[in-house]
Amino acid sequence: MSPSDIVIVVLCSVVGFTLQGAVGFGMGILSSPIFVLIDPRLVPGPVLASTMVFTLAQTVRERRAIDFSGLRWAVAGRFIGTFPAAALLAFLPTDQLGLLFGVIVLFAVGLSVSGLDIVPRPPSLFVAGLFSGIMGTVAAVGGPPLALLYQRSSGATVRGTLSSLFLVGTVVSLFSLVPVGRYGYDELLLTGLLLPGAVFGFLVSRRFVSQLDKGYTRQAVLTVATFAGLVVIFRYFSA
C-alpha cells in the first residue's frame, strides 16, 4: 500500500470504530467496502481481528445492558453460519469473492433501511445470527441483521448485545479463516493498521453517542457503503 492508502485505511478505522462504539455497529459496513478496493487482504481477517479487540472492551463497558436471553440464540445462529461461509471463502475464486462481497454489502444496506420491525424472539434471533455469521465471515459486515431486531431497544442494549455477539462471532470466524488461508502473517500485520482506530474509537465514542445517532451519520455511512459496493460489482463486470 502507498502512504496515502495507509492514511485512508487508518482514517476509515477511526471513523468506523467511533461509529460502532456510539451506535453498536458500523465499522464493517463503512470501512470494508473501501478496504477491499485498497487491499482485499484487509477483509475479512484484519477487520474481524481488530473488531474482536474493540468489542471485548465494548462488551465490558456495556455489560449491564446486555440481553443475555436473546444473545444465546443469536450466538447459536452465528456459530452455524460461520463454517459454510469459511468454506465458501476457501473455494470461491478471488474475482468472484469481490462480486459476492459487493452483493453482501448492498444486502446489508438494504436491511438497514428496510424499515422492517421484527420482534427479537428465539426464531428471529437465530436466523439473524445465522445471517450475521455468513455476512461477518465473508465480508466482515455482520451487524445489520441483529441491529434490525434490536432497533426498538435502548442504545446501551444495542451496543452491549451486538458487541457480545461480535466478540464471540469474530473469535469463531477468525479460527475458521486460518485453516482456509485467509488469516496469516500478512493479515496479522495489516491488523496493526486498524488497532489505533479501535483504541481511539473506544475512548471517544461515548462522548458522541447522542450526536452520532441522529440519522445524518447513519445516512452518510449507508451512502458510502452503497457506492463502494456498487463500485466493487462494477469492477467485476468490467474486468
Image (cartoon, rainbow, N blue to C red):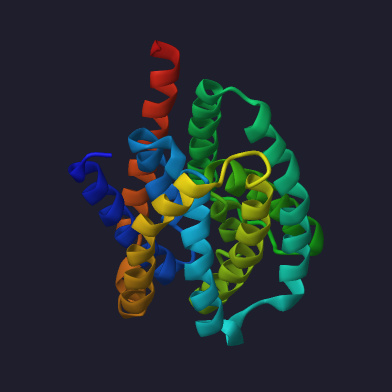
Residue 125 % position (x, y): 73, 59
Relative height, residue 184 to residue 155 (above, below): above
Q: Residue at x 49, y 28 (%)?
A: 98
On-image quarter of the N terminus: top left
Q: Residue at x 36, y 27 (%)?
A: 231
Q: Quadrant of residue 129?
A: bottom right
Relative height, residue 212 to residue 37 (above, below): below
Q: Quadrant of residue 65?
A: bottom right
Looking at the image, which is closer to me, 149 or 82?
82
Residue 230 % position (x, y): 40, 28
Q: Residue at x 67, y 57 (%)?
A: 118
On-image quarter of the C terminus: top left
Residue 214 visible, this angle: no
Judged from this view, the residue extending furthest toward the bottom is 64
Residue 167 % position (x, y): 60, 66
Please tell me how many numbered marks the rendered image carries: 0
Judged from this view, the residue extending furthest toward the top is 238
Judged from this view, the residue extending furthest toward the left is 4
Residue 198 visible, this angle: yes
